[in-house]
Image (cartoon, rainbow, N blue to C red):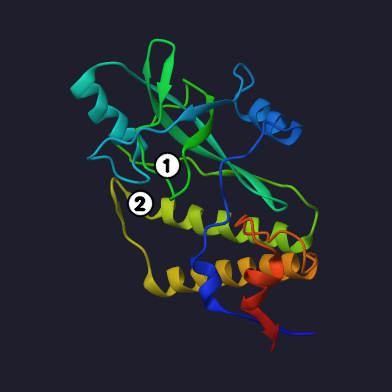
Amino acid sequence: MAVYVDPEIFKRSFTRTPDAITPAVQQLAAEISPEYQPRYVEMAPEPMSRPRECFFNVKAKIERDGGKILYGWAIWEWPRVFLEAEHHAVWSNGPSLIDVTPQEPGIRRVLFVPDPAQEFDESSYQRRPNIKRPLNPARAIADWISETDRFHEYIEGCSHGPVARVDVRTLKALQQKTRYAQAGVLVWLAEHTKRNDLCFCTSGKKFKNCCANFFRPA
């Protein structure tokens, strides 16, 4: 049966800091940085820090207060769907680590895996692709990961320093494919979530009182 997905659901953020360092998290951390263990790092964003600009935020913090930059990976989770490692950096002052970059509302700490060799090249501005691992073998999840990887690969391939020169038609086509693939994941989740189960958006509400309202027969 065809399902209509209300576009409002795409405004929600489904990824979050993992609640626990599970075997799946340990496996991903060992894959990307085998010499280091994942650890939770508290957030303390600086007033002038910008979202998604961790490398420059830490550099500005060092210029004001000293300390060092520690490169690594922030690990995010979309429960039941995937784990994702994002190239990241935090501020280091001896044994203390602080994430000075603002994240999504409600996120107060990040799960961080140090990887000092993975420096950010400010001259090229090339960002390392996020590393995703599915938490379920559903075809919809594999398709969505494939489309998001293709989208980010295109953006980075068009980047020259801080500027990305893209073909608008190609960009829109890739965005549509990514959105369609994400809709497939959401439909799969809705089909595999009972009405009285907790909602897959991690709001803490029952599914019937939350994201179930975004789906209806087409």
Real-space CA distance between mark 2 and mark 1, rounded to the nearest whole angstrom = 9 Å
| Dot 1 crowding, Cα within 10 Å, few <14, some 14–19, many 20+ | some
Residue drawn at (38%, 55%), measured in percent from left and top? 158
Q: Among all residues in the image, which is located at the extreme top?
A: 94
Q: Residue 201 carries which label?
A: none
| Dot 2 crowding, Cα within 10 Å, few <14, some 14–19, many 20+ | some
Q: What element carries label 2?
A: strand
Residue highlighted by disc 2: 159
Residue highlighted by disc 1: 127
Quadrant (top left, top right, bottom left, bottom right) of the C terminus = bottom right
Which mark's residue is nearer the viewer, 2 or 1? 1
Left or right, 175 with reference to 144: left
Camera-side residue of 106 and 163 = 106
Q: Among all residues in the image, which is located at the extreme left?
A: 64
Give percent across and percent down for residue 61: 25, 27
Camera-side residue of 211 and 27 = 211
Camera-side residue of 120 and 124 = 120
Give percent across and percent down for residue 8: 51, 75
Please state which amino acid type lies under the numbered disc 1. Answer: Arg
Q: In this view, does 108 lie above or below 64?
A: below
| Residues at circles 2 and 1 in contact by the CB criterion of under 8 Å | yes
Left or right, 13 with reference to 32: left
Q: In this view, does 55 lie above or below 81?
A: above
- Residue 118 can be seen, yes or no: yes
- Residue 184 can be seen, yes or no: no
Give percent across and percent down for residue 172: 45, 73
Q: In this view, does 27 lie above or below 191?
A: above
Is tag 2's residue or tag 1's residue first in the polypeptide sequence?
1
Quadrant (top left, top right, bottom left, bottom right) of the N terminus = bottom right
Residue drawn at (32%, 39%), measured in percent from left and top? 124
Please state which amino acid type lies under the numbered disc 2. Answer: Ser
Q: Is mark 1 on a helix, strand or loop?
A: loop
